[in-house]
Amino acid sequence: MLTGIHIVIIGGDARQLEVIDKLNNLDAQLDLVGFDRLDQYFHGVNKMDLEDIDPTTVDVIVLPVSGANNEGYVESIFTEKKIQLTKEWLSETPENCVIYSGIPTAFLLECERDCKCTLVKLFERDDVAIYNSIPTVEGTIMMVIQNTDITIHGSNVIILGLGRTGMSLARTFDALGAHVKVGARRPEHMARITEMGLEPFHIKDLENKVSDVDVVINTVPAKIITSLVLSQMPSRALVVDVASKPGGTDFRYAERRGIKAILAPGIPGIVAPKTAGRIIANVLSELLLERFEKTDN
């Protein structure tokens, strides 16, 4: 149990409701920041403004998947107020205070360094990323069906990246009957793509692989779908970019060419927030129980 552990949950979307419910059931002391428009009631949980919380009492800070931007602002769909996390506030938290965020940002990395907090990047964990790839794949399929006038079966699909999400995407689109090519850089990924019965190619050769493509799905958080690549693509092609913001696509040039390009980094929170929230809640609760039970011992 997390009895007596003071946890501040700041901002987020519907995924955070599963986190709140899980940690509340573990008897943590919960303060919610950025939830003043939330109708759902959690017994014993406090809705607060950040400036009204004494940072010296905080053991854990839970941020949404997107973390905090470079000015420390945290997004929340449950409030119209601006929520800003500051170094001054964080510097007053205890040295053993832990910040859990989906992804790291420059601001959070600076806070870890300057405020002596520990930053845990949940989405860099293999278990979270692999579990999360399931709703990502389902949401990507939905977007492809909604934004094309052909079946996935028989279509020419390119997947960029063979990380945890890229592998799930490649397997699923292959199983649905698409002709799948996978772009990667690492030799072991090339070998795995071949072992999967798919066509591998090096990402540097992407511009030579897109002349007949119907769908390109990018998982790489770097600008690889450049104007040069887009210029070689048929205008009917669809790009679904599921990499973290700002994605890996030249969206301006895609629009100029009439190519539909969708930036969709938070697909799980859109198509399956309950499942996506449970993934985060289960892993987070395990980490917290392990951390504080060790402390108690």
Image (cartoon, rainbow, N blue to C red):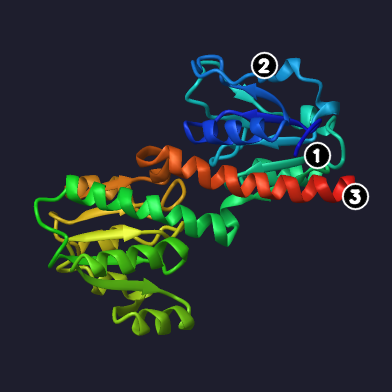
Q: Is residue 164 above or below residue 77?
A: below
* Residue 203 in view: no
The mark found on residue 297 in the picture is: 3
Measured Cα–Cα span from mark 3 to mark 1: 18 Å
Kind of residue sitting beneath label 3: Asn
* Left or right: residue 69 compared with residue 92: left
The residue carrying mark 2 is 49
Q: Residue 115, percent across and down? A: 81, 39
| Of marks 2 and 3, the one in the foreground | 3
Q: Residue at x 38, y 41 (%)?
A: 272
Of the two numbered discs 3 and 1 on the same chain, state the one appearing first in sequence: 1
- Tag 3 near tag 1, CB within 8 Å: no
Which of the 4 quarters of the picture holds residue 86?
top right
Dot 3, crowdedness within 10 Å: few (<14), some or many (≥20)? few
Q: Residue at x 9, y 56 (%)?
A: 150
Q: Residue at x 31, y 59 (%)?
A: 217
* Left or right: residue 232 compared with residue 295: left
The residue carrying mark 1 is 97
Which of the 4 quarters of the picture holds residue 196?
bottom left
Q: Is residue 231 above or below residue 148?
A: below
Kind of residue sitting beneath label 1: Cys
Dot 1, crowdedness within 10 Å: few (<14), some or many (≥20)? many
Asked which secondary structure carries label 2, the reply is loop
Kind of residue sitting beneath label 2: Asp
Q: Dividing the image into 4 quarters, which one contains the N terminus?
A: top right
Q: Is residue 275 above or below residue 38?
A: below
